[in-house]
Amino acid sequence: MSVSQSDLSNLHYGYDIVVATTQQSINKVIKRFLAENGDQPVTNLAFVATSSTDEYSLTDYESIMANAKETDPGFTDPFAIADGTDPAGSAAIQALAKQKFTAAVRLQLGLPKGMGTENAPTFVELPTRNGPVTFNMLCAQFQVVIYNPGTGFDPTPTWHNISQPDDTGWVYSALVDLNLTTVPASRYGDLPASVQREIKNLSGSAFSVQQLLFDFTNATLSASTPTLSGLPGKFKTTLNTLIVTDYFKALQAKGEPVVGVAVRRSTPSVSSLDITDLNFMVNPYIGSGGVPQPNPTADEQAVASLNYLCATNGASLPGANTFTWNWLDQQQAGQYDGVVAINRDALANFFRQQLTGFAAANCFNASVNVSLHGFLDTEVRYSWSMSRGQSPTVTTPASGAMVLSLTHASSSSDQAGLDGDMGRMTLSPSYTMTVTFSGDTIVIYQHLKVYLYVRSLATSASGNIIDKTITDTYTISVNADGRLSVSAPAVSRTDHSETPGTSGFLNFFTGLNSIIDDVKNWADDFVPTQFNDIPVSVAQSFVFPGGNSFAFKSASFSDDQDLVSLISYDT
């Protein structure tokens, strides 16, 4: 199951645009954030003994160190005291003991010193059901020192100094919610550069910016914690709690990794597809039968996706529902970061707005008049008119390659004499325009037909005096800048117009050739369609997964005619 199954017009969904990013791509953003922010400050935490059942109370690290130095002028750094040092023979440890010191922790946010980004583990794991994401925490430095003064069961004082392995580190896992918040205008300068560039292009427009962030304020440690040998059980509990709090404080102080940014227009243009509402949802890995797989492998879990659900032009945004397909398969996930999908109905509605006026120029209402004149009413006169600019009937099929149809038909008849024995005339114009999505093409087909019947006494002539088609084929492709573009149309024409045979005698009495020539003149304005803007790149300027702009890599229509594009983040 893959992007070709995109079916956003399905009643379960109805989103105008979806931007889906894989778990693998979200982790790429986190790794880049940590790699680019390797100069994090070092945090030192100190703990002292208390008289309560909780033996470890957080205190000011600098005060403990200053007081210890007064006792031992040679005292420098508890983290430099070797593991297993005998407290009885160490003036530094004794100086700390006088301050009721029990432990200290040194943390520095980032990747462990011996770990490159290519070897870093998965930082973010999307849930297999609705709920918080799993955030795996890593530190560039993580060191713990413990002073145990001895108890009645084990009266021998001990000193422990342990550090995380350089190549793997200690990994703590926390459950973290995602939160969509509005960014104050005063903070636009803190947004990623790609977002700021687009905001500058919106001068004079009413818009707001929403940012998807990890909600670290409610983070809780999951059951997965590292095994740190040599630490008392109670201290492990205290340490685990503080790790979550202080790790995320340090992360937020640096600006925290952005999961996504979206710009919402408050006053959308009716001629485009401007995003006016946004929500998000996690889509787990979908197994056979179109249902979430409860125990996906690591490779399968990597293609689980975070989805930005967008409504355009003031439309209501439907509630979130799990998609029954994966946006990328496992092979694609190694090449691309996600997918942009535009609902067939939203795109068809755009074409309806663009084409209705164009089609109306070829929609005619006919009127004819046949009357008797002269001595004894023996002269038959024929008159006619066709008024253009009529409103076509618009149909948007729920399924199939044809997504839009605009049609109009009119017919007028009149006669003179008994049951029309002196003269009769019928004029029937009709027009059809259809829009079809298939493969990487948009095909617009037009058919203009005018049927004419004229009778004078017992002689008649009839035929489609106008019967023309124009087929415009637009091809969607990716240009050198990674944007979707639409080619100038390849135009195909047919002309099956008929000229009904007329003898000089019939023409003398009816003026048929003149009527035919006059009607044909109405077809002179029957021309190919032209578009200056087809909004296939709309999401590129308004949705920024991971805070980055992205480049399109391909474009085609899904089996259900959604426009789908594979994307990669700009770096």
Image: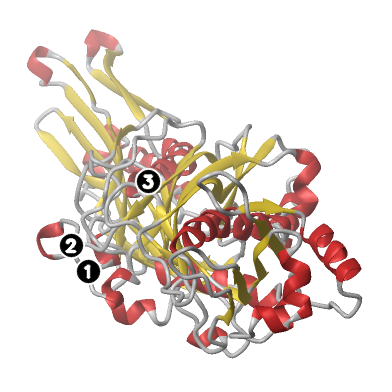
Residue 81: image location, x then y, percent: 70, 83
What is the distance, in whole Å, between disc 3 and disc 2 at their CAs? 34 Å
Mark 3 is on which residue type?
Ala
Name which quarter of the figure residue 428 lies in.
top left
Q: Quick one: 456 or 543, which is closer to the camera?
A: 543
Describe residue 379's horizontal placement relative to residue 278 as left or right.
left
Task: Tell me, yes or no, whether the two marked residues, 3 and 2, touch with CB atoms within 8 Å.
Answer: no
Q: Secondary structure at mark 1?
A: loop
Q: Residues within 10 Å of mark 2 (few under 14, many from 20)?
A: some
Q: Which residue is mark 1?
A: 296
Task: Tell me, yes or no, whether the two marked residues, 3 and 1, touch with CB atoms within 8 Å.
Answer: no
Task: Tell me, yes or no, whether the two marked residues, 1 and 2, touch with CB atoms within 8 Å.
Answer: yes
Q: Quick one: 460 or 27, which is closer to the camera?
A: 27
Mark 1 is on which residue type?
Pro
Mark 2 is on which residue type?
Gln
Q: Quadrant of the N terminus?
A: bottom left
What is the distance, in whole Å, between disc 3 and disc 1 at their CAs? 37 Å
Nearest to viewer (mark 3 / mark 1): 1
Residue 571: image location, x then y, percent: 63, 76
Q: Residue at x 71, y 72 (%)?
A: 37
Q: Which residue is mark 2?
A: 293
Q: Which residue is mark 3?
A: 348
Name which quarter of the figure residue 61 lies in.
bottom right
